Image (tube, rainbow, N blue to C red):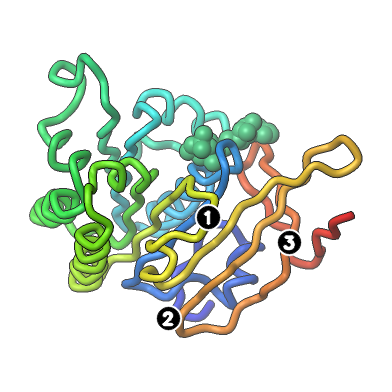
Amino acid sequence: MDISRIPTGIPGLDAMLKGGLIPGRVYLVKGAPGTGKTTLAVHFAIAGVANGENALYVTLEEPAENLKTDMRLLGFDLNDPHFTLIDATPTAERYVLISDFFEEFASNIEKMADAIKRQFQERRYTRIVIDPITMLKLTATKEMDYRRAFLSFIKTMMRLRTTVLLTSEMERTDIEEYLVNGVIELKTFSMNGRLSRGIRITKFRGSAFDDAIRPYEITERGIVVHKDRVLTLP
Ligand SMILES: Nc1ncnc2c1ncn2[C@@H]1O[C@H](COP(=O)(O)OP(=O)(O)OP(=O)(O)O)[C@@H](O)[C@H]1O
Ligand SMILES: [Mg+2]
């Protein structure tokens, strides 16, 4: 394995990425609801944990307990001590259930960066997931401010020397796509009355990549990408 690459935990996707992601950069996984963004992000975080690294996972929509239960079915143990799960989902009972970090992680992207930096005082994380980033965007009032804050977030993450995976539900091209170092897209297609899933890389700064749409499945072991098959659309 190329030591200058960070594996995603999905072998077929790593092949498409020519070995994996480039460490210390920020990536976006985009796709419609149910396409597997969270599953892909958990693969990435757990691959680090399996390698003895620390992973930080901030969940902004799916409550931590649900996430743990769903991911356990796919064989992922989110209770591993190297896996830090922060629940920043809005809930009426947050003062009871959620850590003090809720406000900082969920209110806007600047505060998110500060809260992450504070987490680094406890331990160093090589992998971070923010799932999804969409929530933070909704709190931004001006596009220009969001753009500036997003760029500053990327710089902070680079300074922390950590690899970040953001998920997004946005269908159209949005400013995050221009600013991040790479974009992985998950799509579903309806073919002959059946649902087909396709994954493609639309951008990967600093690297060659496989630009075909490859079929993928969500199985009881998580995401499987068929790197040698092409998704042929009717
Ligand atoms: N064992 C399994 N076999 C097949 N499909 C599964 C299995 N476990 C989960 N799935 C499918 O995985 C999908 C959920 O993936 P995931 O939660 O990662 O998607 P997501 O893109 O994060 O969705 P959302 O936008 O709602 O957050 C669901 O459509 C679910 O049916
Ligand atoms: Mg999700």
Element carrying mark 2: loop
Q: Is residue 105 above or below residue 28?
A: above
Dot 3 or dot 2: first in sequence order is 2
Q: Residue at x 32, y 52 (%)?
A: 55
**Image mark for residue 214:** 3
Between the C-alphas of marks 3 and 1, the distance is 20 Å
Tag 2 residue: 4
Q: Residue at x 22, y 39 (%)?
A: 106
Q: Residue at x 32, y 55 (%)?
A: 128
Q: In this orientation, does residue 200 appear?
A: yes
Which quadrant is the C terminus positioned in?
bottom right
Q: Nearer the viewer, residue 49 or 67?
A: 67
Percent x, y of residue 136? 28, 45
Q: Is residue 211 above or below residue 111?
A: below
> Which of pointers 3 and 2 indicates the residue nearer the eye?
3
Dot 1 or dot 2: first in sequence order is 2
